[in-house]
Structure formats: structure tokens, C-alpha cells
Amino acid sequence: MLTDSAKRLSEDTLMPILAREAADKPLSKPVMLEIYGHLAEFGITAARLHEDFGGSGLSMLDYGLIMEQLPPAIALSLLSHDGSTVRFNAGADEAVRDAYLPDFREGRKIVCTANSEPNAGSDSNTISTKLEIEGDRAFITGTKMWITNASVCDCMIVSCSAGNDERGRPVPQRVLVDLSQSKVGLAETPLAGLKQGHLCEVTFDRTEVPLSHLIGSPGDAGKYMTIVWNANRPLIGLMALNIARRAYDMALAHVTDRKQFGSPLAAKQLVQQDLSDMEAAITSARLTCLMALATLDTGARSNGISAMAKRLATENANRVVHTAMQLCGGMGVTEELGLAQLWADARVFQVPDGTQGILALIHGRDITGTAAWR
């Protein structure tokens, strides 16, 4: 029932909104707020937030079953918003929480996380964006890149360096930046895929924030990033597999209708082998993602399995779309059929929340008990 409801939300409400907008441009802020209104009504703008704080308190498995039904560009935006709400709630001053959380929860305001930097991607412990405290004021200076939702958000949870520890490594501090109060520079980053989504570079030039907007304790930012990442990774895998399933369905329809050498392409042995491989790739990766989410629900350590799930799912998704393009021949490389855009969309998902290489190392660390990067 949950899956069917999410599918109806996607097909009857969300996809028509995307269809009426330009397919090659980021959606405007009013359109995004319209979308978030529908997501809030469905109860998933604070899906991971505990019910004690007014969230849905969904299990991660149920959340995954919903997310795989949503249009991928919307699902990725929601992932950023929902995960950022969790990061905000964990450690925010009570008065600040009361001022912002209801709007995040109800989708009236969009929030994102600004963590990655030009020189701090996979190694997120090397952030250089500085937090300086002068009396009763705090200032942020630095640049963030690859930030989902930044150009349409109302608030950001920014990871800053509050100084260095005894080993000379930055001590990360979470800070809430309200864009209605603090000035930042925003530049949209054009992407090959997910063109209706939003990815930005954000610059802080001694951006002033209230001291009350510092969240949690210095040094705890990495902990909450990891907690959210472990859920995000299999969820992103399911988003990529949503695209792969669409490509598979297109290819199956094509080879069923297209006749060559006196019979449908679907009757050819190699075509049937390709279809079998595609179905197996989607099914096995999907089950791995769901297993990772179910592992999270038990409270067990999930770093390795979550990394494995995203890496397998995004790799399989790209391979499925590639094979679909091959099966569709000339039509496969046309804009008319749309497979080429699906390939570009699927390719994007191999980057956020861990590239293929770093995910393999995270999984390898769990297997061997030895970290390969330090």
C-alpha cells in the first residue's frame, strides 16, 4: 500500500509538474515549494525525524520503498532536505529548533547541507571553511561546492572548521545559515544529467551568523554526516535503479515491437540474454539496497553494506542503461527516445555521498578492519 501510494503521488502529481517545466533547466523556487507542499502532505519532508519532534519516524526500509517511486531529481532534493533536517535537529538550541523545525518539517522552507569543498570531497575531514568567533558574533569564510538544493534553499547546515585538533586536523562545527539574514554567493553548477535539479557553488565572505546558530559540539559534525550518509547511500542506489528500470522498460518495448530478419528482436538469443542480465542487475542491486536499509533499522553497523549497496546499484544502473541503448540501436542514441538523457541522469548518481572508489574503500575497511586511506 505504501509503494502504491508513493507511485500515485509520483505519477499523478509530481511528474506532471516536471513535465510542464523546461526539461533542461533547474526548477524555480516557487515550483520547488509547490513540490515540497505535496511531499509534506504525503508526510516525507521529515521522514527520518523521530515522532517526538513531529517527524514521520519512518523505518529506513519503508522510506526506501517510497523514494524509489519518486522522480529522481525530486528524490535527490528531498534526500538533502530530510537529511539536513536530521543534522539540524541533533544539537540545535531549543529556541532555534522551535523557530525553524516546523517550517522544515512542513516543507515551507527548504534546507540543505554544505559540506564538500574544492579540496575536501572524499576526504571530508580536510574542510577549510573557517568559523571565527568574535565576541557575540560568528563569521564564516570559505567556499563549498556540489551543494544540492543551495540555489532554492532557505537555510544551510554548513560544516566549518572551528580550529585544529592535536594532530593538526580541522575540528568540524555545524552552523545554521539563514539566507534571509546572512549573505552568501551562489552559482548554479550545470550538470549533464538531472537538469531540473539544483547543484551549486556557495561562497562565504565573512558571512555573519548568530552564535545561537552553532549546532552541537565542535567535532561532532563528522558523526552526524556519517549517520546520514549511511542511509543516503542505499537510497541513492534506489534512485539510480528507478532510472535503470525505465531504461529496461523502454528497451523491452522496443525489442518486442521491432522486427529484424523476419521476427521480433525479442526472439533473438543474444537479446534475451541481455534482457536477463539487465533484470538480474536491477533486482540484485535493489535487494542489496533494501538489505542495507533493513540493517540500519536494526541498529547494526552499516557503513560497509551501505557503501556496497550504493556502489553496486549505481554501477548496475549505468550498465543497464548502456545495454538498453545498445538494444534500441539508432533510436537508443536519439533525443526522441530519451535513453541518452537517462544515461546522463544515472551517471550523476555515482558521485553524491561517495564516489565509486571511496565506497569500495569504506566497504574494504569493514571487510579487513584496516583503513586504506590513513
Image (cartoon, rainbow, N blue to C red):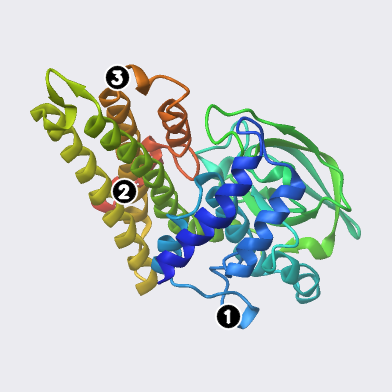
Residue at 58% x, 80% y is 51
- Picture coordinates of residue 269, whole percent (x, y): 8, 29
In the image, 199: left or right of 57? right
Instruction: Tell me the distance, in whole angstroms, between the alpha carbons under discs 1 and 2.
Output: 30 Å
Looking at the rendering, in which quadrant would you find the N terminus? bottom left
Residue at the disc numbered 1: 51
Image location (x, y in percent) of residue 64: 42, 61
Say which label, 1 or 2, has the lower sequence index: 1
Crowd around label 3: few <14 · some 14–19 · many ≥20 (10 Å): few
Which one is closest to the eye, mark 3 or mark 1?
Answer: 3
Q: Foreground: 101 or 89?
A: 101
In which quadrant of the rendered image does the C terminus lie? top left
Q: Earlier in the sequence, mark 3 or mark 1?
A: 1
The amino acid marked with disc number 1 is Glu
Mark 2 surroundings: few (<14), some (14-19) or many (≥20) residues within 10 A? many
Indicate the position of residue 137 as horizontal and vertical percent values. Answer: 89, 56
At label 3, the amino acid type is Gly
Q: Amino acid at mark 2?
A: Met
Dot label at residue 329: 3
Q: Residue at x 29, y 36 (%)?
A: 253
In percent of width and height, residue 79 lies at 55, 54
223 is higher (above) or lower (below) than 182: below
Report the number of discs: 3
Q: CA distance from mark 3 to mark 1?
A: 51 Å
Can you identify the residue that label 2 sits on?
A: 308
- Secondary structure beneath dot 3 equals helix
Q: Considering only order in the chain, which callout, 2 or 3, is on the residue closer to the N terminus? A: 2
